[in-house]
Image (tube, rainbow, N blue to C red):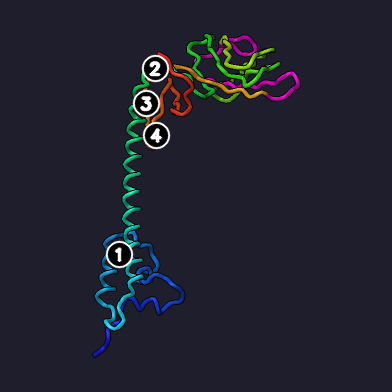
Amino acid sequence: MSNISPVTQLGNQTSGDTNPLQQATGGQDLASQDVFLQLLMAQLQNQDPLDPMDNQQFLSQIAQLTTVEQLKTANSNLQTLQLYQMSINNAQSVSMIGRQIKAAGNSFQLASEGGDASLQYRLKSDAATVKITIYNQNQQAVRTIELTGVKQGEQSVTWDGHNSDNSPLAAGEYTFTVTAQDAQGNSVQADTFITGTVTGVVFEDGVPKLKIGDHTVSMGDIYSVGQ
């Protein structure tokens, strides 16, 4: 009568202490509980009665099954928490509609030809000179405003909507940059802001972003919220 080769003997065919269940699956991770149980039952059914499976090995494989189950449960819980957090973020973003916000950014809308626009920025420290450069939609500089003796903190300057030749510019979208230096000629950090009323919410790859006119703002870029 021929003997049935026990699954546990697969470990004798290779060197090292590789787990026989991993060898039986070509070295792949046992991510499925069903596959794990099927292989474990095959080991028990086909073991040599004269040389049964070692108790320590059996307990080790049961512990491996428990670990797999714990990882699956943890992953499921993390997915649930992620969905819950997304729902909270979505609800918060929708509640922002109609609110006045200030957020990181450097774009703004000139409402009418030759009209005024408020440009806001913040200096990390006092600046001896500040240069504000305004660009049109083609990224061409159309106006430069130079200031002196500006204190640290939040600042605002009004642009009259005219170019360097004092000609009125068309309504539309513009951007601006701020560069500053202290009395010793060292650069001073300047952060620019955009302000406006939230008119809607868009979702990009599941992430909510607030609409201010034609611009979108991430929730993490908001500095202040008003009525």
The spot of residue 54 in percent (x, y) is: 34, 74
Say left or right for 128 vs 104. right
Secondary structure under the numbered disc 4 in the rendered image: strand
Secondary structure under the numbered disc 3 in the rendered image: helix
The spot of residue 139 in percent (x, y) is: 58, 25
Q: Does 221 lie within the magenta span?
A: no
The answer to whether the residues at label 1 and label 2 have Cβ atoms under 8 Å apart is no
Residue 13, quarter of the rendered image: bottom left
Of the two numbered discs 3 and 2 on the same chain, state the one appearing first in sequence: 3
Mark 1 vs mark 3: give the one in front. 1
Residue 93, quarter of the rendered image: top left
* Residue on which disc 3 sits: 93
Which of these two is toward me, 50 or 68? 50
Q: What residue type is labelled 1?
A: Phe
* Residue on which disc 2 sits: 99
Task: Work out whether 96 lies above or below 32.
Answer: above
The spot of residue 32 in percent (x, y) is: 30, 59
Which region of the structure is painted magenta? 161-187
* Residue on which disc 1 sits: 36
Q: Distance between the residues labelled 4 and 1?
A: 38 Å
The answer to whether the residues at label 3 and label 2 have Cβ atoms under 8 Å apart is no
Give the residue at the far right of this rendering: 184
Of the two numbered discs 2 and 4 on the same chain, state the one appearing first in sequence: 2
Mark 4 vs mark 1: give the one in front. 1
Give the residue at the far bottom of this rendering: 1
Q: How far apart are marks 3 and 4 (CA)?
A: 10 Å
